[in-house]
Image (cartoon, rainbow, N blue to C red):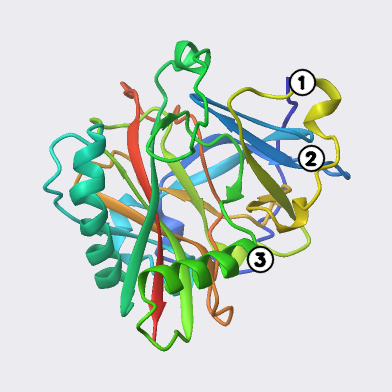
Amino acid sequence: MSAVTMPAASAPDTLTVPLDPLEATARAAPAIIRYLSEGDFVTRRYVSQGAEINTGTYTDHAVVVRDGMPIRDHFALDTHGFMLGRHHSAIADFTDRSAVDGGYLAEVEALVAQLSGADRVAAQGWMIRTSADLSQRAQEKVANYQHNGGIQPPAGEAHVDYNRPTARRAAARIHAQRFGDHAGYSRAICFSLWRTFSPGPQDWPLAVCDGRSVGEAETASNTLFVVDEFPEGEALTAPVEGEADMIAATIFRYRPDHRWWYFANMTAQDVLLFKFNDSDESVTWRCPHTAFHDTSLPDTRTRHSIEVRCIAFFD
């Protein structure tokens, strides 16, 4: 069981970026967010059908998550690392894999191009995430399970899905596959487009962290292993040849500077777009995120959501 670290009641606001006067008006919700603990660990994320586990040691921290919904149009990709848009999808059932593959991915590509100003966008994998009980699903044995198009629990810790090398490799590979007739690109942004399709308010909404409040000192890479069955014991952290070149996320240690936001009571017409990685680091170029249990609102409901990874390219 992870420990919970409570902030001191008299602790000053140590944010490195002054809080915007408009942002200061936002309602504050209490939250517990899980971070990588201080220390050296073999950090890996193992994913199987209906379940995920991380190696290393994690600690739960009590933080404040501000509700950005009343000021939704204030947030900008290159300032905060995220934004909330509006979009009506033609998809009636987001659990219909053929409908998502056949129609929703094209919608996402057009929408992300519109919201970001990109010249072209390539959608990649997608995933349903739900706070419903998936314990029975986790017990299923599925050969050659792929972490794409399935159903998983909400994210459990502060993270960004790509580290720098993973993002750079993904952008080059996807551009060559999808847009080989173009000469190249000057900028690439790896995004996630996230929407809920269950009634609000959600019990485990997604929280996003203002990328300006995050530094390099608190980061670590977390290698992804997609498995049919989880390893056990020492096998979880045993050396793996070529691990440095494998897909890896970025995970974070707690800092009081981190400024967290969420958008309460999202509907299916709300879309949260946030950065995994922007090759232009002169602007806010990444956005840590995680789910949290929202205890600030009454009558919350089980969350069902869909996330789509995509890469936007600029000439």
Q: Residue 4: give its label.
A: none
Looking at the image, residue 17 lies above or below residue 259: below
Percent position of residue 293, x then y: 48, 29
Query: Which residue lies at the image location 22% right of the left edge and 58% below the top edge?
Result: 106
Instruction: Choose top left, top right, bottom left or bottom right for residue 35.
Output: top right
Mark 3 vs mark 2: which is more N-terminal? 2
Looking at the image, residue 202 lies above or below residue 269: above
* Foreground of the two, 256 or 287: 287
Q: Residue 232: give its label.
A: 1
Looking at the image, residue 96 lies above or below residue 241: above
Q: Amino acid at mark 2?
A: Ser
Q: Amino acid at mark 1?
A: Glu
Percent position of residue 209, x then y: 53, 54
Q: CA distance from mark 3 to mark 2?
A: 23 Å
Percent position of residue 137, x then y: 45, 16
Q: Residues within 10 Å of mark 3 (few under 14, many from 20)?
A: some
Mark 1 vs mark 3: which is more N-terminal? 3
* Foreground of the two, 29 or 25: 29
Mark 1 vs mark 2: which is more N-terminal? 2
Q: Can you say which quadrant of the picture contains the C terminus?
A: bottom left
Q: Residues within 10 Å of mark 1 (few under 14, many from 20)?
A: few
Q: Residues within 10 Å of mark 2 (few under 14, many from 20)?
A: some
Q: Which residue is mark 3?
A: 165
Whether residue 185 sits left or right of residue 194 in the image: it is: right
Secondary structure beneath dot 1 equals loop
Q: Which residue is mark 2?
A: 37
| Res 86 seen here | no
Whether residue 109 sits left or right of residue 9 in the image: it is: left
